[in-house]
Structures are given as C-alpha cells and as structure tokens.
Image (cartoon, rainbow, N blue to C red):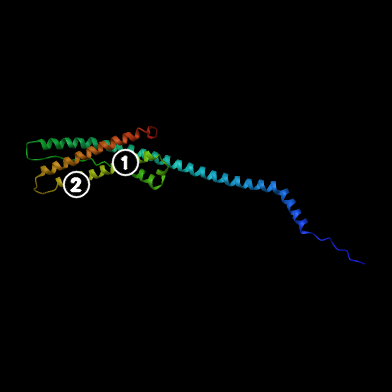
Amino acid sequence: MSEKTNPPVTTQASASSLGARLRAKAPELAFEMISIGLAVMAALAVDQWRQSRADADLAETARAGVIDELVSNRGELEHALNENTALLAALNEELSNDDDSISINIQFEFALVSTAAWETAQSTGATRHLDFDWVVDISRLYRLEVLFEESQARVVEAIGDFMAPDNADVAPRLRELRQQLQLTISLTRNVIDATNELLDRDPELISTG
C-alpha cells in the first residue's frame, strides 16, 4: 500500500498569490500613503501659518510701540525746545549788556527721550518683519536722537564750567554755553521735524488716549 503525498507547493504559485494580494491592496495602500502625505503637508502649512501670524502680530505690536515712543519723545522735545529757547534769549540779552558784570539764572531743560521700544523691537527680531524702508528711517531718527543727547550733555558740561567757583572771566564761558545751547536747540528742531515726518505716515497708529 503506497503512501499518499501532498502535492508540492511551487515558488511560482506562491509568488503569483502574493502578487495578486498586493494588486488587490494597491488602491488601499496608495490611498493611505496619499492621506499621510496630505496630513503632513497640512500640518506643516498650519505651523507655517501660525508662525507667520505670530511674526506679523509681533511686528505690528513693535511698530505701534515705536510710534507711541516717538509721540512721547516729541512731547518731551517740544517742551524742552520752548524752555531752552527762552534760556537762549536770556543769554543773548546778558551778553549784549555793556555792563561787565554777569548775573543770570540758568535753568536748562533736559529732555528725557526714550529708546526702549526701539531696542526691544530689535532684540526680539520684530524689525525683520517690518517694512525695510521704514526701519531704515526709524534707525536714522534714533541716531539723530543720540546726537541730540550728546549735545545736551555738552550743554550740561558748559553750565558746570560757567558756574565753577574761580576768578576766570565768565563772559567767554557764557559765550561757550550759548554756542552749545544753540546747537542743542537746532538738533531739537531737527529731531522734532524728522519725527513729525515719520508720524505723518502712520496717523492711524498714533494713540489718542
């Protein structure tokens, strides 16, 4: 009695069966791959949109902060200009007297201008998302304010020299003080004019309260 043997499973039959299963699954696999790809792209697009929105919000906040700072600085400068123009008139009158004696009460108005908002805009990277030409103009204005502050410091130094308790002739020192004060007044006007020109571009950003 002979033994029954199972028919051999050929490699060709196995490969053919696998291929058939893969062909059957192909649409489903393709759909899954496309779905995953679309999900990844959508997630990246959302992240990019959120980052762009955050950058735009930061830039707008920084721009409004700089505008507010310029408005505040302008008020400080205008007050100082009025006071120091009156001081210059008093110096001119004192120096025009024929009398050798000099008696004048010097009250110099020191303007305190701020750069905090502009420095913050730079340190946070907000300026990278602002209009380039606007950033250049703002940079020039703040540089002009630095020159103004340096000029103020020289006026204070000249006042100190004038009031020094020595026997030197005070008239030359008063003339030096007048010269420094004239320069500071001129720079004050320049900063105010430059500020007005910039603020005229963004009237909707100027706080009224």
Q: Position of residue 16 (x, y in %)?
A: 76, 54
Asked where in the image residue 76 lies, by quadrant, the reply is top left
Q: Position of residue 20 (x, y in %)?
A: 75, 51
Compare residues 173 and 50 and report the one nearer the observer.
50
Tell me which residue sits at (79%, 59%) in the image.
10
Query: Looking at the image, which residue is at 48% across and 42% down?
Result: 52
Task: Please tell me whether residue 113 is drawn above or below residue 22 in the rendered image.
Answer: above
Which one is earlier in the sequence, the residue at label 1 or at label 2?
A: 1
- Secondary element under disc 2, as helix, strand or loop, is helix
Q: Mark 1 to mark 2: distance in Å?
A: 26 Å
x and y, in percent, of residue 86 in the image:
19, 35
Tell me the amino acid under the disc marked 1: Arg
Q: Which residue is mark 1?
A: 140
Q: Which mark identifies residue 18?
A: none
For badge 2, the amino acid type reads Glu
The reply, left or right, for residue 13 in relation to residue 82 is: right
Residue for badge 2: 157
Please state if 113 lies on the left or on the right of 128 as rendered. Answer: left
Which residue appears farthest toward the left when viewing the image?
Answer: 99
Residue found at x 53% / y 45%: 47
Q: Is residue 77 left or right of residue 58?
A: left
Q: Secondary structure at mark 1?
A: helix
**Total residue callouts:** 2
